[in-house]
Amino acid sequence: MCCALMFFSVPSLGYDRLQFETLQKGVEEWNRVRAESGQEPVDLSEAVLKGKNLNGVNFRGAVLRGADFESSNLSNACLDGADLTGARLFQTCAAGASFRDALCKDALMEEALCSDADFRNAVLDGSVIKQADFSESILNGASLRDVDLRSTDLRHADLSNADLSGAYLWKADISFAGFDNTVISNRTVVESGSNGTPQWAEKHHARYVHEEPAVSFQELSIDRSRTLLDKELPVNTVAQKILFGQRLDKADELSYDVFQFKLLKKNITEWNSMRQAQPETPIRLSSADLSRKVLDSADLHDADLSRALLKGTDLVDADLRGADLSGCNLRQADLTHADLSGADLRGAYLWRANCSWTVFANAIVDASTILDTGRHATAGWAEMNGAVYRESN
């Protein structure tokens, strides 16, 4: 009776409170209760478990959507069949852990230690796994579509039969990695920084697939309802999001253009092609959450990015000339060689951003601008960097 109560659901919370309290008692107690409760479902969605020692924990089949495991120890843990969609595993140690058949879409696994981990048949589409250690890991049959694997250690990893369509492996160490029958495409960026080719596939015993361009900018609504193609879409961005399923009470909090947001996150090459083909189209990405996205070389000139979240986002070589970045969160963003000429940075937050060779010519700053040093912008800083300092209202 006690064990049954321990796993009683509390629907008012994002996760099961009693299960969470059981886990706080330690892995040994957690595993004992799980063993005694049989196949009772586990829901720890959005639970904050930062820095916890969960070595050997049994999370088989658990729902862990959006859970925060930053800097936690998940070594030798069992996460087979678990749902880790959107989970945060930043700098998490998961060496030797098993993620077989797990759903890890859009997870943050940057700088995670997953050496010797088993990800067979796991789905990691859209996840950020850059600068992580996946050496000797098993990724056989895993779906890694559009995954950011930049600078990741994949030495001796088994990626046979995996799907790397659209994956980003620039500067990854693939020494002795196995790619037998692995799917790569023209959208895949291999370790050299080039796009995937039939020649690369043949050299690594992989399988090359040519992917057709995604739907055009105007046709992004096609999978929602074909009838919308015959209608003029509302200019009002709130109306757009309501039309596409956004809750009315949340729509006014998001002022970005939903179609532009989807295209930018989907494919930079196609985004830049759209901008070149439609130079007069206003870019409305105000308040958009683009944190930790790969936007290297993105054409964002004159874009409205006011109050946007770009924390930890890669904007290397990005064109941000004349962009409205007022109130934008650029903390820890990589702005190496980015061009911010004439951009509005009033109220922007750039603490710990990489501003190496960043161009600030005529960029507008004021006392509310927080620089990469953590200090407020000054007239002296503006003069030194060719920017324009304006007194705050």
Image (tube, rainbow, N blue to C red):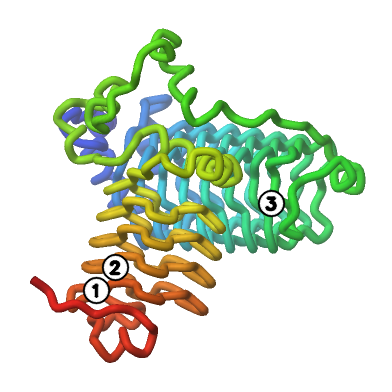
Quarter of the picture holding the C terminus: bottom left
Residue 119 versus residue 117 in the image, above or below: above
Q: Measure how far apart labels 1 and 2 are at the Cα level.
A: 6 Å
Residue marked by disc 1: 369
Q: Nearer the viewer, mark 1 or mark 2?
A: 2
Which residue is rendered at x = 33% and y = 43% of the image?
284
Going from the N terminus, do you reach mark 1 or mark 2 first? 2
Q: Check contact, mark 1 vs mark 2: CB within 8 A.
A: yes
Q: Looking at the picture, which amino acid does disc 2 mark?
A: Leu
Residue 230 falls left or right of residue 294: left
Q: What is the number of the mark on residue 345? A: 2
Say which element carries label 1.
Answer: loop
Calculate the distance from the C-alpha at mark 2 to the C-alpha at mark 3.
43 Å
Q: Nearer the viewer, residue 121 or 171?
A: 171
Q: Residue at x 64, y 63 (%)?
A: 151
Q: Residue furthest top?
A: 227
Which residue corresponds to mark 3? 137
SS at mark 3?
loop
Percent position (x, y) of residue 274?
A: 53, 39
User: Can you say whether 353 is above or below 66 in the image?
Assistant: below
Which quarter of the rendered picture does the N terminus lie within? Answer: top left
Say if mark 3 contacts mark 1, CB within 8 Å. Answer: no
Mark 3 belongs to which amino acid?
Answer: Ser
Q: Label 1 is placed on what type of residue?
A: Thr
Q: Nearer the viewer, mark 2 or mark 3?
A: 2
Residue depicted at x 25% and y 81%: 377
**Considering depth in this image, is 318 or 69 the residue closer to the camera?**
318
